[in-house]
Image: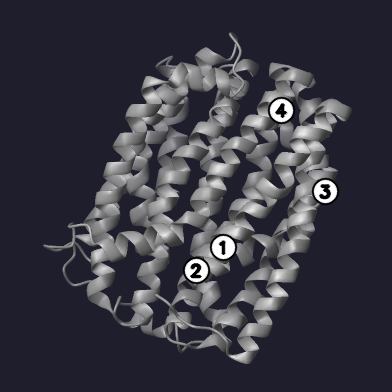
Amino acid sequence: MTIQKSPTELGTQKVGKLLLQYALPAIIAMTASSLYNMVDSIFIGHGVGTMAISGLALTFPLMNLAAAFGSLVGVGAATLASVKLGQKDYTTARQVLGNVVVLNIIIGILFTIVALIFLNPILYFFGASDQTRPYAYDYMYIILLGNVVTHLYFGLNAILRVSGYPKKAMYATIFTVVINTILDPIFIYWFGWGIQGAAIATVLGQLLALLWITKQFANPNEVIHFTRGIFHLKKRIVIDSLSIGMSPFLMNLAATFVVLLINQGLLQHGGDIAIGAYGIVNRFAFMFVMIVMGINQGMQPIAGYNFGALQYDRVTRVLKLSIYVATCILTVGFVVGMLFPDTAAGIFTSDQKLIDLTAEGMRIVMVTYPIIGFQMVTANFFQSIGMAGKAIFLSLTRQLLFLIPCLLILPHYYGTIGVWASMPAADLAASITTAVMLWWQFRQFKRGKVVNRL
């Protein structure tokens, strides 16, 4: 299938077939990506120790912050590119590609410099102790050195996916997982590099994948490809990309603060080992969230193209189908989390105390999973069609309006249980808010009160 045919089919083929075609590779890629994160945790947990898992968990806020800046460019640009393809504005779509490269390099370098200078104070601020800080520092130092590579890899892979090659985007992600899985035991055990070995394996996998993706965009026969003139920043493209990407940026930024509060609450009421338990719960539960993110990625080019082509009935159909599939996936996660939490925790560690703490937290955190699928899909849907304000609002309701207040109040009364319970309480409140907003938007679609502003 050529790129010339692929954008057109987004507006003509059956929505269900398209969602399967685009979402399945993305789901496989996101599942592989979650395994990618789990592999590090598993090898570090069994090969380095319990405190190393806690140290790894301490890097989550900083990695969320790095991801926030990456998504600010990558997600926004990918959405803009898909809309421009729907409008058959291929010149602007190519310019979006060039701007992604330049913006990611600039932002990636600046973030790396600032984070490296203040790395130790940042880690202590995020809840590190004298026992866990060395592990967190050793891991994050390597990750930060490869930050530009990470930004470019995720940004260009997003453009590759929406430009008609979801399978190639999937292959790139799977490739990073395979490389990471192969190199982790070699670097951690054989070379004796410990937690730094896991970080080196992560960066090398992304670097190799980035080189392959770059080769794909170097092909002049594709509609979206590298060519002269596209690497000059265009004010309109930068503004549109950053405004659309502001939703995932603010969501990741809020997530950084949220994880900070979680770590501090768990450290105060449960110690370093409680932070390690959260690290495991986060890795396991996020695996199901990543699958839903794959569904969102598959939905994005379909919704964006048809919105750009003014085919709102198809936009509505792909949204409804995506919500249904996402709900089914997270219900499976709920069942596994309720029935087999000890088994899941045992994959990461053999420390029985850590397993018990993890199982307790997992049952609480995942209790609302069956109802949050449509909240995730709906927030991404508004982002996919360029309604940045609505996407930002929905993305932040859970984090800022509900979760942060819960984390500030409940732990004072219920200790570690209060920290765990804050998450499902926020999920429930955010889902109710999303249901109201989604109902209102459906009414707008039916009345034809939608204007394409991109």
x then y, percent, for residue 256: 57, 37
Would you place residue 5 above or below residue 274 in this image?
A: below
For mark 1, give the secondary structure: helix
Q: CA distance from mark 1 to mark 3?
A: 25 Å
Along the line of sight, the residue nearer the viewer: 100 or 253: 253
CA gap, disc 3 and disc 4: 17 Å
Q: Amino acid at mark 2?
A: Ser
Report x, y in % for residue 110.
Answer: 31, 35
Q: Position of residue 173 (x, y in %)?
A: 43, 51
Local secondary structure at mark 2: helix
How far apart are the alpha carbons under marks 4 and 1? Answer: 31 Å
Pointer 4 residue: 277
Q: How many marks?
A: 4
Asked if residue 52 lies left or right of residue 191, the reply is right
Count residues near mark 2 (Cα–Cα under 10 Å), then give few for <14, some for 14-19, many for 20+: many
| Tags 3 and 4 touching, CB below 8 Å | no
Return the residue at label 3: 367
Residue under the point 43% across and 34% down: 182
Please name the amino acid that badge 1 sits on: Ala
Task: Judge whether residue 24 can be spotted in this image.
Answer: no
**Observer-nearest residue: 417 or 29?**
417
